[in-house]
Image: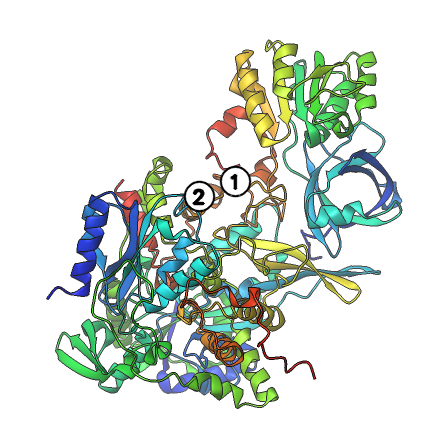
Amino acid sequence: MITKVMEKKKLQKFLSNLCNQKLFAPLKDEEGKINFGLVKDPAEVVLEFANVLKPVKSLLFPQTETIFEADEQGIHHPEVSENGVIFGLRPCDAKSVRLLRKVFEKDYKDNYFLQREGSYLKIGLACTVPGENCFCTSFGQGPFFNEGLDLLLADIGEKYYVEVLSEKGKKLVEENSELFLEPTEADMELRQIAQANAEGKIGREVNVKRASEKLGQAYDNALWDETSKICIGCGICAYLCPTCHCFDMTDEKVASRTRRIRTWDTCMFSYFTLQASGHNPRPTKKERLRNRVYHKFKYLLENFDEIGCVGCGRCLENCPSGVNLIEILSRVAES
Amino acid sequence: MTEYIYSPKPAKIKKIRQEAPDTKSFELEFEGKEKLTYLPGQYLMLSVLGEGEFPVTFFTSPTEDRLEVCVKRMGKVTTALHRLEPGETVWVRGPYGNGFPVEEWSGKRLVLVGGGIGLPPLRSLLYYALDRQKYKEISLVYGARSIADLIREEELVKLRSRGVKVDLSIDKEEDGWNEFVGFVPDNLLRVSPSPENSIAVTCGPPIMIKYVIQNLQKLGFEAGQIFMTLEMKMKCGLGKCGRCNIGGIYVCKDGPVFSYQRLKSLPPEF
Amino acid sequence: MASVEEKLREKTGQLLNEGKVKCVIGYERVGPLKARPFFARSPADARKIHYSLLCSPNLAVYLTLEEISAGEKIGLVVKGCDSRAVVQLLQEGIVDREKVVLLGVPCQGIIDLEKLEDELDKREVLLSSVKEISIEDEVAKVETKDGTIQLDRKDVVHDVCINCQHPTPVLHDVLLGEEVKPWGEENYGDVKEIENMDLRERWDYWEEKFEKCIRCYACREACPLCYCEECLADKTVPTWVRKSVRVSENGFFHLMRTLHLAGRCVGCGACERSCPMGIPLLKLFRKMEKDVKELFGREAGMDVGQKPLLATFSLEDPEEFIK
């Protein structure tokens, strides 16, 4: 693997160069929330943050996406390449793409996702100070995990340690060669220390493997009734989750045309499985919450060989009712 | 060339027939009279552009010379469909789903049990079996709420002359009805088909399916001999949107045809 | 003297022991700065009941979420605004008064963790070092690992709590604490700020806010008064709000919800607190609240006997639109 370092003072120039290619990076909004946004001024890019609020799926799998438009001439498909750069991806978000890709690739290739995802260059930022709700290490990853990225930057004090992880990443480094230096022994050591420190700071843990295995017998466990009582049935957990990808397809009439759109949907909404006849296979919150946990930790594993969670902690941090996935998994693991 | 997996192709409505008060059948024709290859039990995702899309099983068998679907008016899209006239265009994609395992059933006795709008996939299977002539015996137990709700009653009665045992029923007494009066599961018990070398296929309202399965088991049918085709809210038909799952299987891709044996091992969420 | 929490635990235990209720819906503490709703079903559960300034959700929302009562009697812990939501639900005939035992707790305000963090940042204190917070009159005492800091109450509670006019529950079966009086007059400063903008400014302001909405519907689900089985936003026939997530649809949803809560919203703020994107929803609802006060002299959730505002008319109603 090619490794480099970049002096921190050169970062602004790097970001400035990237701006020419449509750069998405963490930006702070009026409400103080940090999200990926299109960068006009590189000085606005936020570098001190735990994680962006809306995960990277919001760029790769937009909340509202046009599937086609139809008029008298027939069906017209949209362009789906973005050719942009995403900077500031945390390793958990980067890893989430692996599951999304598998789902959209299996049997029928969903080019809306695949082409868009493939057209982005992804630059990650390792978590030197993980968030307090993070538990990525429970999945065999960690705050310095580099999968799914073209470059991974890690803060080692005066510099960023840079791992070049793909041909695209290599090309980008070559195009900006004046901003990169060769790493020294000291740099490499600092990198090791930063990683060890970060991993040590992950405060939450759950035995995912055991929970996943125990799910097979936990279907009738009282915990589903108990934990679902406080759930209010909104879509926060699923919409802010990097791996949740359920969607709806509807038609909109736009003047004399039809636009078929795909929009995020969530199994937590009461009408997700409601049939036109009025029959609902998952009529109460208990069935829906249970299904969500099973889907992420059992069914996705069975169908795509991937767990549907990367341990980012967004769901338990943002749930208005305090539903805690780690607590649920721990109860299953100990059942 | 980029492949767009959610894009339907146009099909002209050649003929519309009123089958029941809120049910119509639509004969569809593709551009250039293209013939679609499909299996009984499979389905199409049918769009009325501007309104939406919904899954509908084939009414006809692939051995027949025309393509028909039969749709009950339930919600937004089906209501819009019912307002269309012959000559107008709908858009379809498919066929999707696993269909009935017709090859495996070669040489067996087929017992088809359905109610109301459950007839279409059974009709498709029935004509397939008749035309392919690879099945020992075919019998149909079918009923509806009233005479008006029976789909294709005349056509089904005519099947008796082709060697199919047809037993029809309506829920309540009505003038002009000489056959069984009562629910389909009860008629099934009266008909009492033999489970020997037989496959039972059922389709209809969930409550009917429940009692039909019970009664089939009373008659000696094993779980592996009982099949059904399930209905679920579907949006993509390709196993991606995550909506139609029963446990770890997707009804759109791994179904909609399931044996009771398989269904028993899944969570009761259908 | 027993604290409110101790009294609440005792009362909960008593109700459950005597089999008077199937469960008591209250709060439990799950972290130094976090509390969440809790369904206590046994005397052992009663010991976990918690009450503090962290008790943010409006528990009245559980009265209309499925399968809760199913005819059973339950206990419900209510703060000032929560009790008004219950009164409003009673006005609308949604709740059976006989089936709910209201455990009233007077409220000093709900802590706004973002505001608290800002204040602590100024003093170079970490939010994670906070152990306890309490309020007395206008002063908030923040106990940290390294000592106690005194802050202005206004700087640590949610904006909507600063001039709350009903901190003491207006309806209860038992009041488990001393009555709390309002701290000041309601001046609707946040609403006037928007009213003073010209139309263009207002449009730009709300366009920017509605752009952020991800249609998670947490605001709707957290609201005790949003209990329609089929929300107009989810109806497909006819389609009032499209599924696409963009300013037009988001804005329509929020404005529609505001109008549907006219004369019904009790200003608890659960909606704004549940919004993950930080959209200032309360401004919309408080504008509605202010207009309703000015036009009809009405306040939601105060008198069970009152008929719902928009379901009645009086000959004295203003008619400025008829010129």
Q: Quadrant of residue A332?
A: top left
Q: Nearer the viewer, residue C289 or C214?
A: C289
Q: Is residue A128 left or right of residue C281?
A: left
Residue lying at the far front of the rendered structure? C315
Q: Amino acid at mark 2?
A: Glu
Give the residue type at disc 1: Pro
Q: Is residue A21 visible?
A: no
Q: Position of residue B152 (x, y in %)?
A: 80, 26
Whether residue C310 sits left or right of residue B203 in the image: it is left
In space, the residues marked 1 and 2 are separated at their CA atoms by 9 Å
Q: Label 2, on which residue?
A: A287
Can residue B18 be seen by looking at this rendering? yes
- Depth check: give the residue in front, C54 or A282: C54
Q: Where residue C133 appears, x then y in whole percent?
A: 20, 73
Residue C278: where, in percent of width, then height?
43, 74
Q: Which residue is mark 1?
A: A281
Instruction: Name the residue at 61% across, 13% down.
Output: B189
Secondary structure at numbered mark 1: loop
In the image, residue A301 lies at what x, y percent? Answer: 43, 44
Q: Are marks 1 and 2 in contact (CB under 8 Å)?
A: yes
Specify the quadrant that holds the N terminus of chain C: bottom left
Q: Quadrant of residue B221?
A: top right
